[in-house]
Amino acid sequence: MNRTASKRAALPLRLLWALLTLAIVASACTGSDAESAEEHEFGRIVSISPTGTEILFAIGAGERVVAVDQFSYYPPEAPVTDLDGWSPNLEAIASYEPDLVVLQTNGELIAGLEALGITVLAHDAPVVFDDVYAQIAQFGDVTGQVDEAAQLAADMQADIADLIAAAPDASGLTYYHELDNTLYSVTSGTFIGQVYGLFGLDNVADPADADGSHFGYPQLSDEYLVDADPDLIFLADTLCCGQNAETVAARPGWNQLTAVQEGRVVELSDDIVSRWGPRLVDFIAAISDALVDIGAAG
């Protein structure tokens, strides 16, 4: 997301991005994608997906990526182009003469690309952890980087297992995950919530969406959070909204919170939290480190 975007504009974009995960199923390719990479030489790849870009580079297909959307600024080796990730344009993408286009599911765009004879790898956000690894394997199959994809998934699984094992027992500890500074959060039923669930943490946002009417993304209030008094606060709005431990402590009543008083406000990178590729490990490491710090202090 453009770092200069106003806070007012950031909310609908970030909430829309979060809500896109609601209509997902296991990641899937279009029909032409199911054919093996051996039958296609994908010399030129365009990625309109930040997560897809990160996966492509992590499995060794990065050298073939000729263009990406404006949100694909990681890894640093990714090309800098001006393709629009929010409203992808068929003609702009086709101008790079790609053999393969990676994007999140978009029926009209997929149909247009395939009509031009361009293979499409369409994917969605994960529902569960197995979806992450299945998606990485899919990228490997389509690009011919099968072994590299398998190794990436295995390394991620091993690293995540180590991070969970390194963290102390978190039973009974509560947390609040902040999507933006208007206090939108996530419940345990979301993929992000499942990440915290790996450590046994209790989500203070769950009661705010007990009936599911907010689809796992309730907007909380200062009063709600002061009453809930979470043991840890995780900020996923440090980039979009300039939030940090100091700005949180300055909010009305928040200086009373246990997390603030005990120095348990964890500043996360918005980008890492919102993507589910190789850097999912970094997100989990931040949680593990926070729990280790609590254990060391206790």
Image (cartoon, rainbow, N blue to C red):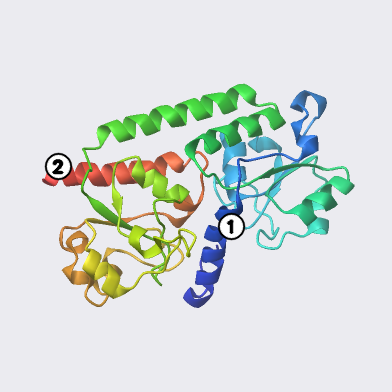
Q: Position of residue 243 (x, y in %)?
A: 36, 66
- Amino acid type of the residue that numbered disc 1 sits on in the rendered structure: Leu
- Amino acid type of the residue that numbered disc 2 sits on in the rendered structure: Ala
Q: Position of residue 276 (x, y in %)?
A: 51, 44
- If you read the primary sequence from the N terminus, does the residue marked by circle 1 or circle 2 appear first? 1
The image quadrant where one finds the C terminus is top left
| Residue 146, above or below 2 | above
Q: Position of residue 215 (x, y in %)?
A: 49, 60
Residue occupying the point 54% across, 74% down: 9
> Badge 1, how many Cα within 10 Å: few under 14, some, many 20+?
some
Q: Secondary structure at mark 2?
A: helix
Residue occupying the point 54% across, 33% down: 133
The image quadrant where one finds the N terminus is bottom right
User: In the figure, is residue 130 to the left or right of 34?
Assistant: left
User: In the figure, is residue 194 to the left or right of 118?
Assistant: left
> Badge 2, how many Cα within 10 Å: few under 14, some, many 20+?
few
Furthest residue in direction left, as rendered: 298
| Residue 21, above or below 248 | above
Image quadrant assignment for residue 138: top right
Residue occupying the point 56% across, 35% down: 58
| Residue 117, above or below 85 | above
User: In the figure, is residue 211 to the left or right of 297?
Assistant: right
User: In the figure, is residue 177 to the left or right of 275?
Assistant: left
Residue occupying the point 81% across, 56% down: 90
Q: Which mark is residue 296?
A: 2
How many circles with numbers are drawn on the protein? 2
The answer for how far apart the CA atoms under marks 1 and 2 are is: 39 Å
Asked whether the beta carbons under mark 1 and mark 2 sit within 8 Å of each other, the answer is: no
Q: Which residue is mark 1?
A: 20
Residue 251 seen: yes
